[in-house]
Amino acid sequence: METIMWVMGICIIVYTVLGGIEAVIWTEVAQAFIKTFGALLILFLIVKDMPEGSRQVIEIGTIKNKFSLGSMNWDFTSSTFWVVLFYGFLINLNNFGMDQNYIQRYHTTTSETEARKSLWMCVWMYIPASLLFFIIGSSLYAYYEVHPELLNQLKLEVVKAKFPNLSSSELLKQAAQLKVEDYGDKVMPHFMVHKIPVGLMGLIISALLSAAMSTISSGMNASATVFSIDIYQRYFVKDISDKSSLRILHTSTIIFGFLGLASGMAMIGVKSILDIWWQLSGLFAAGMLGLFLLGLFSKKATNQAAIIATLIGLVVICWITFSDILPSEYDGLKSHLHKNMSIVIGTVTLFISGVIATRLLSKNSS
């Protein structure tokens, strides 16, 4: 894993530094085709290897409730339909509305009309693309239900990687105690290694790596641009030449690339990368989105009101995200909300606090 990450990380840093946003966009165009074809190929191979084909996938998925969109109860303490819906709406509002990863793409279009077209194209493609990967997950579940020997093999491999010195009997005991979240992220790689023909393995691996490449390269380019324009040229050197500006962009791109690489290394062994990503996204995006909406809808909001609202919002976000680490004697202070609700509650709290602070400050000044 470390070797793959080092090789891919350095390659991404090199082509992003050399090509900038143009390299990011054109490599992502190629990656989009590779990813889509790779995903369709995996789905085809899963269904083809099922004894009764797609009908069996649907039957098992229906029985095991694998096509459910989640509980419809108004419960915000677990991952219900409403938690995912509210989280998804606000995180995408943040992404498409103010995230530099997306904004930098708008600026490459020839007009506002073209930018609007690209936005709506992305919105409409988001649904079938997400659905494809959900279907792959449900199909893999059905496949491993039909082939329990593969599931047992996967569990043993997970335990061996974690406890390499255990005896065979202890390995079996530990494997039997594993929960789905302990091995869920490893099902697709296991299927690839054991069930995909050798000639197609490279294509599938390139599809997975291309997904990482597109995310990392755009993030590096966006972070470098924000640092160069909004921080360095604003607070350190205002009158900077084009040559110096380009040098700062190149240097900061490399630094952010290696920071991302270090973060990836730290994530090795995490039970669910997706859950961690959702929590971090909600934590960082909530404050920015609330501040953005405050500036957009409250024309009278001042810097002072924004600072007060931001501090209040950050307290609420940190409480939802980190209160579960408090000792047991402070159970009454713990948040029982699902952590993905941090962006929902944090954004609403920051926005309302900003509106109230604006009115109070305007009254005091008058």
Image (cartoon, helix red, strand yellow):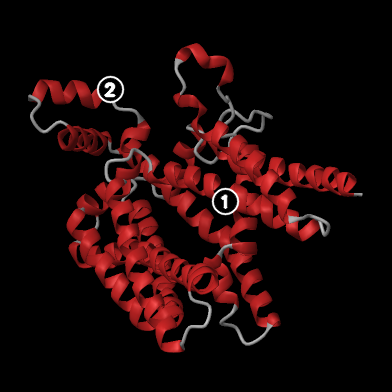
Neighbor class of circle 2 (other Cα within 10 Å; few <14, some 14-19, many 20+) is few
| Rendered location of residue 67, percent (x, y) | 53, 41
Q: Find numbered disc 1 in the image and state the secondary structure of the residue it sits on.
A: helix
Q: Which residue is denoted by mark 2 in the rendering?
A: 177
| Rendered location of residue 4, percent (x, y) | 21, 60
Residue nearer the viewer, 335 or 83: 335
Residue 15: quarter of image: bottom left
Q: Describe residue 224's horizontal placement relative to residue 360 as left or right.
A: left
Which residue does the image show at 62% across and 63% down from the upper left? Answer: 98
* Residue with the most extreme right position: 366
Residue nearer the viewer, 9 or 354: 354
Q: Describe residue 25's horizontal placement relative to residue 315 as left or right.
A: left
* Lower sequence index among marks 1 and 2: 2
* Contact (Cβ within 8 Å) of mark 1 with mark 2: no
The kind of residue on which mark 2 rests is Gln
Which residue does the image show at 55% across and 45% down from the upper left? Answer: 282
Q: Is residue 268 above or below residue 156?
A: below
Residue 175: quarter of image: top left
Which residue does the image show at 29% across and 76% down from the upper left? Answer: 14
Q: Which residue is denoted by mark 1 in the rendering?
A: 285
Q: Using the rendered image of the protein, determine whether residue 91 is visible from the camera's viewpoint.
A: yes
The kind of residue on which mark 1 rests is Ala
Residue nearer the viewer, 294 or 96: 294
Q: Using the rendered image of the protein, determine whether residue 69 is visible from the camera's viewpoint.
A: no
Which residue does the image show at 34% across and 38% down from the upper left? Answer: 271
| Rendered location of residue 105, percent (x, y) | 55, 75
